[in-house]
Amino acid sequence: MRQPSGRCKAGSVDENTTGAGRRHQVVVIGSGFGGLFTTQSLKGADVDVTLIAKTTHHLFQPLLYQVATGILSEGEIAPSTREILSRQRNAQVLLGEVTGIDLTSHTVTSTVLDQTRVTAYDSLVVAAGAGQSYFGHDEYSRFAPGMKSIDDALELRGRIFGSFELAELVEADAERARLMTFVVIGAGPTGVEMAGQIAELAHRTLRHEFRRVDPRQARVILLDAAPAVLGTFGDHLGAKAVAKLNMIGVEVQLGAKVVGMDGTGIEVEDDQGRRRRIESVCKVWAAGVSASPLGRQLAEQSGAGLDRAGRIEVEPDLSLPGHPEVFVVGDMIALNGMPGVAQVAIQGGRYVARQIKARLAGKSAEARLAGKSAEARLAGKSAEARLAGEPDGQPFRYHDKGSLATISRFSAVASIGRLRLSGFTAWLMWLAVHLFYLIGFKNRLTTLLHWAVSFVGRGRSERTVTQQQIFARQALDQLGEDFAPTLSPRPRQHPQS
């Protein structure tokens, strides 16, 4: 049975992590692919797992752009972590943003609203993922939301559909053109998929729904400072993607670096240093990522190196240098040039779970074999390791299963080993892979139905937007750093007159 979880007092250490006879305590930070697959892979192990994340959902980030363009609801790509782990008796889920990790005291500090919690660990798995990088210009986030969270997707949904609504109302041609120009910054898979879906919205879904404007006149611009689209897919598939994007009405502008941005436009600079302005109200940022700031905390305490994206250098077994009880998984690691994709996190999470179980099996074997000969001890350790599925001291090896990107309905590109595919066949592969990695039969079924509505027909069932979704980010910015949400009543004290 699980140990009691203890009370949640501000600044207190979890009671389930103290006391004699307790089980090995594993703390997992993050509910993404790395954190979730680590936790699930420890099912049945003689450990207690505490998963701490700032959201209580598991986000299937590759389909976030479909929430932003009205194809899917947020619930279909972000199921409840508690529901996923409800049958795993040795796991509990805690809501909280991890703000501190103390490698000396083996504790993790997390906060939610005005509550603080300190949780002790025997083994720690840090899988906090990555956020959007604006390359030193965080002020751009106010004008061009990224694509890393449900909040981002809902804000973008409001901005995209809201631009068409406002274009129907305005009188000036210049203002209407500004509202109907959509700019996607970043020509990687996310940017290509986003630009393709905005173009399909304009040319298929919305074309009969307005009276004063023709949505088919919308400009969709995909720009990047790089010289190629989908650079990691190779020149052949990149050229195929550009051809298809042009066919569906997307303007591809390469060698264009963003040097300025405001609410109504964007400044770009070409390779020759010439600057120009693109008038656009709705802009999407799909360029660059930066690892969780927890990586810097770990680096400062352990002496491990960081790369330019804030990813931390780890040992071949994914452990933190000098701290074998701490593992780092997924987008946060800098190891052998591994990409920041879901498969790295999934495979890394499973590998780390095997490492933890193998170590515990080794300790148990040592205890039983303490009085035996050296040969018997070695034989026993080897047997225990095999039974536990120990990787036999082998370092983590990432098995690349390929890359997929959809461009428009019935059209995608696929790079799998030496195989290069494009068009309908690649789209079917994309469809199958994404359905497979969605969590839960219910989500797979409803997603498939929504895809049928959107891809075979023209409908988009998730088009509800509110002003609060669009402007909440700006409101929080205006409140400033002093704003601290709380559930506790704290009335202001007015001075006596």
Image (cartoon, helix red, strand yellow):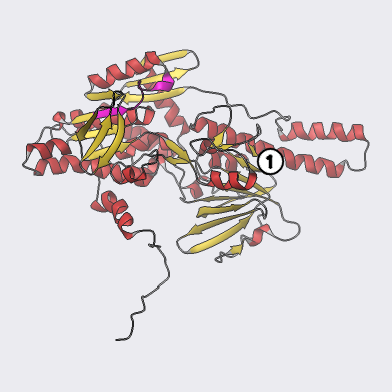
Residue 382 painted magenta: no
Residue 65 to residue 429: above or below: below
- Give the residue number, with chain letter if any, for mark 1: 356
Residue 273, picture quadrant:
top left
Residue 117 as seen in the image, left or right of residue 426: right
The quadrant of the image that shows the N terminus is bottom right
The residue at 66%/39% (across/down) is 321
Q: Amino acid at mark 1?
A: Ile
Q: Residues within 10 Å of mark 1 (few under 14, many from 20)?
A: many
The residue at 46%/30% (across/down) is 436
Residue 381 location (% of width, % of height): 82, 35
Q: Could one spot residue 106 in this view of the protein?
A: yes
Please state the extent of the stretch shown in magenta in the rendering: 221-233
Residue 231 painted magenta: yes
The furthest residue to the bottom: 497
Residue 420 location (% of width, % of height): 43, 14
Please count the marks in the image: 1
The quadrant of the image that shows the C terminus is bottom left
Q: Could one spot residue 461 in this view of the protein?
A: no
Residue 125 location (% of width, % of height): 60, 44
Which of these two is toward me, 106 or 313? 313
Q: Label 1: state its secondary structure.
A: helix
The residue at 45%/23% (across/down) is 403
